[in-house]
């Protein structure tokens, strides 16, 4: 039993977005972003209990609308089929689902009985006319994202595999939740979500206490707690049913359509889908309010939900919408159409303009201008299963099937090849044995764990050099973001090194940690490489090949042991990293006419590429970082 939708404390914008998707499923769904424990999943799952029932044929696996059967649905094609009022489907897409489970596949049980090829519907068929829910959607593997993009764009799921050619309707509302700490979504999938909501836990102690009070009461007696909210739940159901009936009658004037286009242009939104979504959401807001005419306030409310994730952003700029700018544009529209009289718009416009100028002048990330992000390929000659875009990987658990091979103990059964082997081996009496089994070999892309080790010592403290270092890190972080890598950050200064950021897919967090990186003191380079080894040891089981990126001038002067030689200790740890086959890149930050060349010596000990900051800033730079992984000593 789900937590009652009406019992959720506050979160008005989140509730509104979910209700809009219920009123008009063609909006495309809602993306819910926020911190852990902020009721994202609770709200999404609670929606199903207040949705009006839909009609469907009993036993239909495709969720066909009565009178509109899929050509592959034998049940709905029966004139005597029983039509029932059923809850709206709410299907959860697991992150580890296979393509066969999502798309559908050959019914193996029927095939083994010698029957003709029969299609077994997948999750997309089950979600038709309903909700497809993905928790932590930003962690969804790329091959499943591609599947969703195709179905969401066409409203049809096409399956071409195992000798099958099947297409069936797949219209669904996509609801996804995510925590930005684990990284962002691919732009193509992000744009498919009609609306987006940022969710935060209440900061008011009274509200937090009420959240806890209701949750404890729900866990103690779910049925009793739900019964206590029946009246509020019924009110929501009636409101949704009324709004769904009213929606086709709601109109939105050409003046408001012009306003929508103006807002999208002013916020530099490239996707035309934004205009369409705002138009639909504004009408849905009017329908929820029981009105047959959309208003400027409806347009403003829709824009708050449809624009934040679509406006053009710079790398690492946080998503969001300048509400003061939105108010200014709305006021300009009201003034132009004489819809408000006596409103001191000039004063507010000037204040808003000044505020906007002051925001634009703030420097979020103090760094020198760098070139395009380098294209780095990490060649480790190994197999890894974490999805990404940087490196080609063969024989991965996910990805497209490139071939099949005989295997008596397959972990990914190639159904078509198995059945064909049995059919060709025995004439007449069809029987599958272990000798017929085949394994699918998949090809995909894997991600990397990029460990930044950044020198913040006194030898690096000159402002221009530190700005150059931060600029270099920014270019590499941009590349890591585009390739869906994990990143971790170690800085060293004074007497020791510190892990500023544990491995995460959120490169925004890495940028935030480096933004105000303090500098000065001595150079404990040996400490930093020792901590890098320890960090990689702890992440040994994450199936992501590491890449060490060291930014330093190499002037080590802090020993690990009393009386030790800082430089020799540094070289020893560099050799340990090289022995483990850790691919590395050294950025030499030394400047001046006389240079010691310690960074290049360190790169040689690491078996690493060595570049200057000037070389990194060159446009169209392509690097291939090769690691000599050893079968018994490799970190990964």
Image: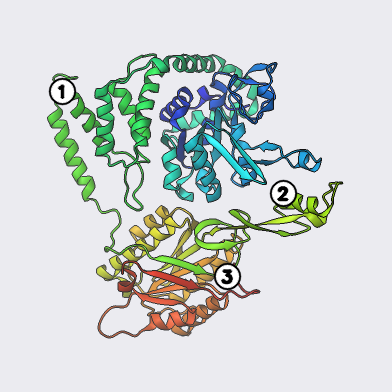
The mark closer to the camera, 3 or 1, is 3
Residue at horizontal 57 percent and vertical 78 percent from the top: 579
Give SS at disc 1: loop
Image quadrant for the C terminus? Answer: bottom right
Q: Which mark is residue 381?
A: 3
Q: Tell me if label 3 and label 1 are in contact, CB under 8 Å.
A: no
Q: Earlier in the sequence, mark 3 or mark 1?
A: 1
Mark 2 lies on residue? 415
The mark closer to the camera, 2 or 3, is 2
| Other-residue count near label 2 (Cα within 10 Å), few / some / many at <14 / 14–19 / ≥20 | many
Q: Nearer the viewer, residue 32 or 192?
A: 192
| Other-residue count near label 1 (Cα within 10 Å), few / some / many at <14 / 14–19 / ≥20 | few
Distance of label 2 from label 1 (alpha carbons): 70 Å
On screen, 588 above or below 185?
below
Mark 1 lies on residue? 343
| Other-residue count near label 3 (Cα within 10 Å), few / some / many at <14 / 14–19 / ≥20 | some
Q: Position of residue 97 (x, y in %)?
A: 62, 45
Residue 27 appears left or right of 102: left
Residue 533 appears left or right of 315: right
Kindly indicate the quadrant of the structure image that contains residue 57.
Answer: top right
Can you name the residue that lies furthest to the front here? Answer: 427
Q: Earlier in the sequence, mark 2 or mark 3?
A: 3
């Amino acid at each position: 039993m789900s937590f009652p939708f009406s019992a959720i404390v506050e979160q008005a914008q989140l509730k509104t977005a979910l209700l809009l998707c219920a009123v008009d499923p063609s909006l495309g769904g809602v993306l819910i972003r926020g911190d852990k424990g902020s009721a994202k999943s609770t709200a999404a799952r609670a929606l199903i209990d207040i949705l009006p029932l839909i009609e469907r044929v009993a036993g239909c696996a495709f969720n066909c609308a009565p009178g509109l059967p899929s050509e592959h649905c034998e049940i709905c094609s029966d004139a005597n089929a029983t039509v029932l009022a059923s809850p709206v489907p709410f299907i959860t897409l697991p992150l580890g689902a296979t393509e066969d489970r999502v798309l559908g596949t050959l019914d193996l049980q029927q095939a083994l009985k010698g029957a003709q090829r029969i299609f077994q519907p997948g999750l997309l068929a089950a979600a038709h006319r309903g909700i497809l829910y993905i928790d932590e959607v930003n962690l969804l593997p790329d091959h499943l994202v591609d599947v969703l993009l195709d179905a969401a764009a066409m409203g049809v799921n096409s399956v071409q595999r195992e000798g099958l050619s099947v297409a069936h309707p797949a219209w669904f509302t996509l609801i996804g939740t995510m925590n930005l700490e684990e990284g962002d979504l691919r732009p193509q999938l992000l744009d498919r979500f009609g609306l987006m909501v940022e969710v935060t836990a209440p900061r008011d102690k009274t509200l937090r206490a009420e959240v806890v009070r209701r949750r404890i009461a729900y866990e103690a007696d779910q049925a009793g707690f739900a019964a206590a909210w029946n009246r509020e739940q019924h009110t929501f159901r009636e409101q949704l049913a009324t709004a769904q009936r009213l929606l086709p009658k709601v109109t939105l004037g050409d003046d408001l359509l012009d306003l929508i286009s103006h807002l999208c242009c002013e916020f530099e939104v490239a996707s035309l889908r934004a205009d369409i979504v705002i138009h639909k959401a504004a009408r849905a807001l009017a329908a929820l309010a029981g009105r047959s005419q959309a208003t400027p306030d409806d347009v403003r409310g829709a824009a708050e939900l449809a624009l934040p994730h679509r406006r053009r952003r710079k790398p690492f700029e946080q998503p969001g919408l300048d509400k003061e700018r939105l108010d200014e544009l709305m006021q300009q529209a009201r003034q132009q159409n004489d819809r408000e009289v006596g409103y001191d718009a000039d004063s507010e416009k000037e204040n808003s303009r000044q505020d906007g100028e002051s925001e634009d002048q703030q420097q979020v990330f103090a760094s020198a201008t760098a070139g395009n992000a380098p294209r780095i390929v990490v060649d480790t000659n190994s197999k890894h299963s974490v999805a990404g875009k940087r490196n080609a990987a063969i024989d991965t658990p996910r990805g497209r099937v490139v071939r099949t091979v005989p295997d008596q103990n397959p972990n990914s059964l190639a159904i078509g090849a198995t059945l064909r082997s049995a059919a060709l081996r025995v004439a007449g009496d069809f029987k599958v044995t272990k000798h017929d089994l085949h394994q699918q070999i998949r090809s995909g892309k894997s991600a990397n764990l990029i460990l930044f080790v950044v020198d913040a010592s006194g030898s690096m403290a000159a402002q221009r050099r530190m700005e150059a270092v931060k600029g270099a890190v920014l270019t590499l972080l941009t590349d890591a973001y585009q390739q869906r890598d994990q990143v971790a950050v170690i800085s060293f200064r004074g007497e020791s090194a510190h892990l500023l950021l544990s491995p995460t897919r959120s490169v925004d967090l890495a940028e935030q940690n480096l933004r105000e990186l303090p500098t000065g003191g001595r150079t404990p380079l040996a400490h930093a490489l020792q901590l890098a080894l320890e960090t990689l040891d702890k992440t040994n089981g994450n199936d992501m090949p590491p890449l060490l990126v060291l930014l330093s001038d190499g002037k080590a002067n802090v020993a690990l042991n009393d009386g030790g030689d800082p430089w020799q200790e540094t070289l020893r740890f560099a050799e340990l990293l090289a022995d483990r086959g850790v691919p590395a890149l050294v950025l030499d930050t030394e400047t001046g006419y006389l240079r010691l060349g310690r960074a290049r010596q360190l790169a040689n000990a690491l078996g690493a590429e060595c570049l200057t900051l000037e070389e990194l800033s060159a446009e169209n730079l392509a690097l291939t970082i090769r690691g000599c992984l050893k079968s018994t000593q490799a970190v990964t």
